[in-house]
C-alpha cells in the first residue's frame, strides 16, 4: 500500500474544500462572522446542551472565541475538572461536535461530568477579532504556530484556569498536540495542567514518502515569497485552488487516486456526517503557518519559524538559526495520554516513534500510549466508534489524575 503522509493530508483537505467551493456548498464565508451566530447557537444549544460564549484576548491582541459547555444533557452540575479542547490545522472548535452527541467528544465529556471548554485558533471563523488589526491586513496574518504556543495557548489556559479556579485537562488533535508539546517542552503551562491527551500526535513530520506531498512542500517553499504575499491561507480561496492545480498537473501525480486512497483509509467515518464537516470546515490559517509546517517536513526537526536568512533570524532569535523545541525537556512527571493510528497519514507511525523515543525517560505510570491500528487522522475526532475506542480510555485516564 502506498504510504501517504504529512502535507498530503493537508492537500486532501484542500481538495475536498476546492471541490466543495466549486459546488457552492459553502454558503457562509469568513467575512460574515458578525452576521452569523456563534458556535453555541449553531452547534451546541440545538443539541439540548447549555452553552456559554466567551472572548479571550491574547497578549498580542487577537480576540479568540471560546465556548463552555458547563454541564451534560441531564443538567447535572459537573463534578469533574475543566477540560480544554484544542482543534488542529484548518479546523476550529466544531471539530469536537461533527458527529451526533453520543459520538462527539465535547458532548461525551459534558455528559460524563466534565466542564468542557472549546478553543478556536486565531484566524478561524469565530476568532477573527483583534484589538487593532483587521484580517484584511497582512500584519494580522504575521504568525505561525510559534505564536499559537506563545500567545493563544497561554491565553486559553489562563482563562479557563481563572474562570474555574482549577487545573485543567487538555485534549489536542493534530496541530493541537504540537503546540501543547512545544509549550510543555519549554515547561510552560504545566502549572495549570492536570494532564494532557494527545490524539494523532504531531511533533516530527519527517516521513515523507508520497511524491505529491514532497512536490507540494517543494512548490510551497520555493514560492514562499509569493505565498507570504497571500498572507491568509484560505483553503476556499483562489490562490490555494491554483496551487492545487499546479501540483496536480505535475507528471506522475494523480490527485484522483490520492483522494480515493485517503477516503478509504479512515476506518470508521459515517458519510452522513460529512455534510456537517463541509458546512463548517476547513478554516483559514496564516500562510506563514503553512510555510512553517512545510519547513518541518523539509528539515525533520521541531524548531521555530525559519526566516531563511541569517540576519533576520538574528533579529528575531539572537542566533543565526531558529531555536529548537526540545521534546526531551517535557517534564517526566507530566501525565500524558497519547493515541495514534496505524493508517494516519499526518501523524505517521514512524514519526510518532521518534516522539516516543524522546519521551523514553518519562515516568512509566505517567505515560499511556494507545495504538489504534485501523485509525487514520480524522477517525480520532469523527469515527462512529471513537467513544469506545478512544474517549472511554481517555476519560478513565483523566479520572486517575
Ligand atoms: C478591511 O476591514 C475593515 C474593518 O473590518 C473595513 O472597514 C475595511 O473596509 C476593509 N478594507 C478592505 C480593503 O477590504
Ligand atoms: C450514520 O448517520 C446516520 C444519520 O445520522 C444514522 O442514521 C446512522 O445510524 C449512522 N450510522 C452509524 C454506523 O452510526
Ligand atoms: C535536547 O536536550 C537533550 C538533553 O537536554 C540534548 O542531549 C539534545 O541534544 C537536545 N536536542 C536538541 C534537538 O537540541
Image (tube, rainbow, N blue to C red):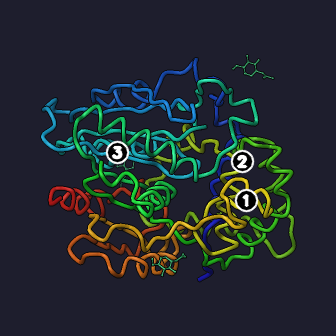
Q: Which residue is mark 2?
A: 18
* Vertical placement of residue 355 versus 39, above or below: below
Q: Which mark is residue 84?
A: 3
* Element carrying mark 1: helix
**Label 3 residue SS:** strand
Find out whether the residues at labels 2 and 3 contact each other: C-beta distance under 8 Å: no
Judged from the image, the secondary structure of the residue bearing numbered disc 2 is helix
| Residue 218 position by quadrant | bottom right
Which residue is drawn at the image coordinates 36% and 35% (left, top)? 159
Q: Quadrant of residue 247?
A: bottom right
Q: Is residue 22 visible?
A: no
Query: Looking at the image, is mark 2 or mark 1 earlier in the sequence?
Result: 2
Residue at image position (64%, 30%) is 30
User: For the residues marked 2 and 1, what is the alpha-carbon distance in whole angstroms?
Assistant: 39 Å
Mark 2–mark 3 Cα distance, whole angstroms, equals 31 Å
Horizontally, residue 246 falls left or right of residue 307, namely right
Out of 147 and 381, give the one closest to the viewer: 147
The crowding category of the residue bearing disc 3, from other C-alpha atoms within 10 Å (few below 14, some 14 to 19, many at least 20), is many
Q: Earlier in the sequence, mark 2 or mark 3?
A: 2
Q: Nearer the viewer, mark 2 or mark 3?
A: 3
Residue named by callout 1: 314
- Please, which residue is most extreme toward the top here? 35
- Furthest-front residue in this view: 318
Amino acid at each position: 500500500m502506498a504510504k501517504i503522509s504529512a502535507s498530503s493530508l493537508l492537500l486532501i483537505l484542500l481538495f475536498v474544500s476546492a471541490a466543495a467551493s466549486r459546488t457552492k456548498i459553502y454558503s457562509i464565508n469568513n467575512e460574515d462572522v458578525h452576521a452569523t451566530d456563534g458556535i453555541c447557537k449553531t452547534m451546541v444549544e440545538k443539541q439540548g446542551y447549555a452553552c456559554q460564549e466567551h472572548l479571550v484576548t491574547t497578549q498580542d491582541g487577537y480576540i479568540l472565541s471560546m465556548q463552555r459547555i458547563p454541564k451534560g444533557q441531564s443538567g447535572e452540575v459537573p463534578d469533574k475538572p475543566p477540560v480544554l479542547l484544542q482543534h488542529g490545522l484548518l479546523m476550529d472548535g466544531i471539530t469536537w461536535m461533527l458527529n451526533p452527541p453520543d459520538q462527539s467528544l465535547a458532548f461525551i465529556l459534558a455528559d460524563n461530568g466534565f466542564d468542557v471548554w472549546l478553543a478556536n485558533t486565531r484566524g478561524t471563523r469565530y476568532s477573527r477579532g483583534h484589538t487593532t488589526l483587521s484580517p484584511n491586513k497582512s500584519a494580522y496574518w504575521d504568525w505561525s504556530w510559534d505564536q499559537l504556543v506563545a500567545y493563544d495557548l497561554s491565553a486559553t489556559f489562563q482563562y479557563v484556569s481563572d474562570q474555574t479556579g482549577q487545573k485543567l485537562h487538555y485534549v489536542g488533535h493534530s496541530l493541537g498536540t504540537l503546540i501543547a508539546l512545544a509549550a510543555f517542552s519549554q515547561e510552560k503551562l504545566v502549572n495549570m495542567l492536570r494532564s494532557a491527551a494527545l490524539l494523532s500526535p504531531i511533533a516530527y513530520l519527517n516521513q515523507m514518502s508520497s511524491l505529491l506531498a514532497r512536490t507540494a512542500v517543494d512548490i510551497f517553499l520555493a514560492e514562499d515569497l509569493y505565498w507570504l504575499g497571500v498572507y491568509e491561507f484560505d483553503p476556499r480561496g483562489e490562490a490555494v485552488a491554483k496551487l492545487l492545480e499546479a501540483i496536480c498537473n505535475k507528471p506522475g501525480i494523480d490527485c484522483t487516486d490520492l483522494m480515493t486512497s485517503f477516503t478509504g483509509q479512515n476506518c470508521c467515518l459515517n458519510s452522513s456526517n460529512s455534510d456537517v464537516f463541509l458546512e463548517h470546515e476547513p478554516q483559514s490559517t496564516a500562510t506563514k503557518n503553512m510555510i512553517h509546517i512545510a519547513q518541518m517536513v523539509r528539515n525533520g526537526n521541531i524548531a521555530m519559524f525559519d526566516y531563511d536568512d541569517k540576519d533576520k533570524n538574528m533579529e528575531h532569535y539572537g542566533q543565526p538559526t531558529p531555536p529548537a523545541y526540545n521534546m526531551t525537556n517535557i517534564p517526566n512527571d507530566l501525565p500524558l495520554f497519547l493515541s495514534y493510528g496505524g493508517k494516519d497519514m499526518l501523524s505517521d507511525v514512524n514519526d510518532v516513534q521518534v516522539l516516543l523515543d524522546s519521551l523514553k525517560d518519562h515516568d512509566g505510570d505517567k505515560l499511556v500510549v494507545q495504538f489504534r491500528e485501523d485509525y487514520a487522522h480524522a477517525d480520532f475526532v469523527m469515527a462512529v466508534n471513537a467513544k469506545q475506542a478512544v474517549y472511554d480510555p481517555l476519560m478513565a485516564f483523566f479520572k486517575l489524575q
